[in-house]
Structures are given as C-alpha cells and as structure tokens.
Amino acid sequence: MRTTRFATSIAFLGAMALPVISAPGAMAAPSSAPASAPATRPCDRLGPWVIGTKAMTIRSKATSRSAARGVLYRGLKFAVHKTHGNWHYITDKTTGVKGWVSGTYVYREVYMGLD
C-alpha cells in the first residue's frame, strides 16, 4: 500500500514539474526583439493611474535623494507623462505640481468586466 502511494506521488510530482522544466525553451525571446528597452520612454500605459499608499512625495529628479516638490495623496488625480526606469514623471491635476514619483507605489487601475 505504501509503495503504491509513493509511486503515485512521484508520478504526480513528475507530471507537475514537467512544464516547469520545459518552460525556459518555450519562453525564448524572438530573434528580432531589441536587446534592451530604452531607459526613458513615453508612457505606453494610458490612465487612469492610482497610488497604492496613503501619500507619496513628488520629487524634482528620478531619485529618492532629490528635493521634494510636493505630496501626492491617495484619491487625487494625476497624469503620467513618461517613465524612466522605475520612476514616473507626473502632473498632479489638483495642484499642478510636476515631478517624479516612484513606480513602486504607482500603478494603472485595472477594471475587470464579468458576465
């Protein structure tokens, strides 16, 4: 009885691991794909955008050590203009302040329609 359970468990785990083992070959990038994405690019994800924290600092440069220009609070509307690495250049629509915010807490709001 134990050997049957053991053999069944090994067969099941082997079947589950098969897609993981063969996945890297299936996920290869096409040969015509660029080697790397540009560091600065126009924002390809149109709004609406939201922040995932109560408030965040709007910075003058795309670094956490740059001067603060303002604070962006949850629920305020803002526009994302461009992206540089994990930073987004935004305009706070309430105050008009422009600057950089960390992409760690800024994301595009996703709506899901269910029938």
Image (cartoon, grey):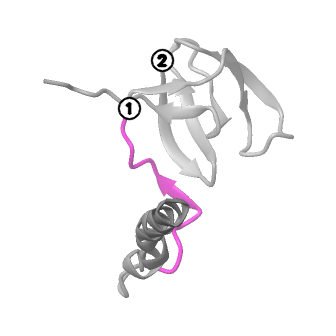
Where residue 78 appears, as percent x and y from the top left, is: 50, 23
Question: Label 1 crowding class (10 Å Cα cut-off): few <14, some 14-19, many 20+?
Answer: some
Q: Residue at x 49, y 36 (%)?
A: 80
Q: Residues within 10 Å of mark 2 (few under 14, many from 20)?
A: some
Residue 40 belongs to the span the image colors magenta: yes
Give the amino acid at mark 1.
Gly
Q: Position of residue 96 (x, y in %)?
A: 56, 19
Point 54% across, 28% down: residue = 91
Q: Which mark is residue 77?
A: 2
Instruction: Say which of 65 and 113 sits in front.
Output: 113
**Would you say residue 5 sits in the magenta stretch?**
no
Q: Vertical placement of 13 versus 52: above or below?
A: below
Residue sitting farthest toward the left: 115
Find numbered disc 2 in the image and state the secondary structure of the residue it sits on.
Answer: loop
Between 51 and 99, the one lying in front of the other is 51
The quadrant of the rendering that contains the C terminus is top left
Q: Residue furthest right?
A: 65
- Magenta stretch, residue numbers: 34-47
Residue 42 drawn at (x, y percent):
45, 52
Where is mark 1, residue-wise?
47
Q: What element carries label 1?
A: loop
Q: In this view, does 111 lie to the left or right of 100?
A: left
